[in-house]
Amino acid sequence: MLALSPKAPFSFQEILNFLLGMPAEPLFTVTKTSVTRALNIEGEKALFSVSAHKDNLEIIFLTPSSQLTQSRIQAFVTEWLDLDRDLTPFYQLAQQDPLLKEPASQHQGLRLVGIPDLFEALSWAIVGQQVNMTFAQAQKRRLAENFGDYLDYQGQHFLIFPGPEKIAPLEPQELLPLQISQRKGEYLIRVARAMQAGNLSKERLRKLAPEAMERELLAHRGIGPWTANYVMMKTLRVQSAFPVDDVGLQNAIGAALGKGKPQREEVLALGQAWSGWEAYATYYLWRTLYGFQK
DNA sequence: GTCCAGGATGGGC
DNA sequence: GCCCATCATGGA
C-alpha cells in the first residue's frame, strides 16, 4: 500500500463518476470506490487499484511488486490522474466564465484523466476518429485482446495494451477482422513503425514548444488537428491544447448556449477566454455530455 | 431508410 | 486558401 497526496482541490469521487459515465474502458475496471488496472513495467506485469483514503489516495498492489515497480506505478498514477496539477487558477478563470462556471463548481476537484502511453493514446484517437465512442472502445479492446497482454486475478481478466512493436509488423488487412478499416489500419501501423524507428516518441515531443509539438504530430499521416491536440491534452499534458474540431466539444457548447453546434470561429473565440487552460476547459465541457449522476 | 458519431486525406478550383 | 467526396461502421 502506498499513499498519495494530490494537490487540493481534488476529488477522487469526481474522477470515478466521470469514468463511470463514459462508455466502458477496456483497460481498467471502475467501481464506485476504486479503479483497478494492470500494467507492464519493463517486462513485469503488475496489478494495482487506486481508492480514496480520507483526503488522500492509496494505491494497493494486488500482485507482488518490486520496489522499483511500485515507484513506477506511483509515477504512472500521478501522471494518469494529473495529481500534481494546481487547479486553483483554472477555477478562478472558470468562475467568471459563462460556460465553465457551472461544470467547474459542480465537479470541483475533477482531474483530466490522461493516457500516459503515447501509442495507446494515438491508437485510441485514430480508431475514435469520426465514429461513436462505444464502437471505438470495442476496437481498442480488440487491439488489446489480439495483440496485447493480460493479467488474470481472482477470476477477472485485465487487459494490457500492446506496444508499437506488436502492431508495426502487421498489414492493414490483418486488422480488418477487428473492424478497423483499411485506412485506419494504415494509420495505426505507420504510427507504430514511426515509434519503433524512434521518429515519434513522447520523450522527443515533450521537449518541444506546443506549436512545434503540434507540427511534429501533424507530419504523420492519420494525425490531423483533432488527434494532435487530443494527444497533447491527454498524453503530453499541454494545458493550451484545444481540439477545436471535436464534435463533443461543439455539442457541449451548443447545449450550454441553448442552440445548435457552433461554428469553428465561435469555438475559437470562446477559447480565448480559456487561454492557458483550454485542455481543462474542454474536459469539463465534455463532462457535461456524460451526465452520470451517482 | 437517414443521420450522426470525441476526423483525415486528397482532389479540384 | 476553401469545398467536397470518400473512407467506414454501428446505433438511434
Image: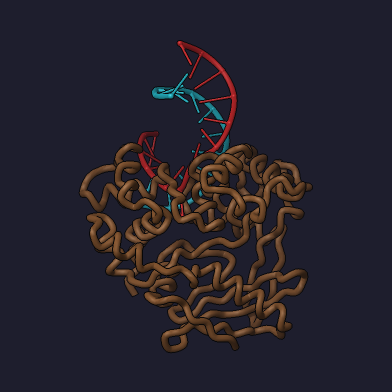
Chain colours: A brown, B red, C cyan
x then y, percent, for residue A99: 26, 55
Quadrant of the image containing the N terminus of chain A = bottom right
* Residue A77 in the figure: left or right of residue A93: right
* Residue A225 in the figure: left or right of residue A184: left
Q: Residue at x 57, y 39 (%)?
A: A215
User: Number of numbered discs present?
Assistant: 0
Q: Residue at x 68, y 83 (%)?
A: A63
Tell me: residue A115, above or below residue A180: below
Tell me: residue A79, above or below residue A184: below
x then y, percent, for residue A270: 30, 46
x then y, percent, for residue A225: 50, 40
Q: Quadrant of residue A265?
A: top left
Q: Is residue A66 visible?
A: yes
Tell me: residue A32, above or below residue A23: below
Query: Residue lying furthest left in this view?
Result: A258
x then y, percent, for residue A24: 50, 64
Q: Residue at x 59, y 85 (%)?
A: A60
Quadrant of the image containing the C terminus of chain A = bottom left
* Residue B6 in the figure: left or right of residue A121: left
* Residue A67 in the figure: left or right of residue A219: right
Q: Residue at x 62, y 60 (%)?
A: A117
Tell me: residue A60, above or below residue B8: below
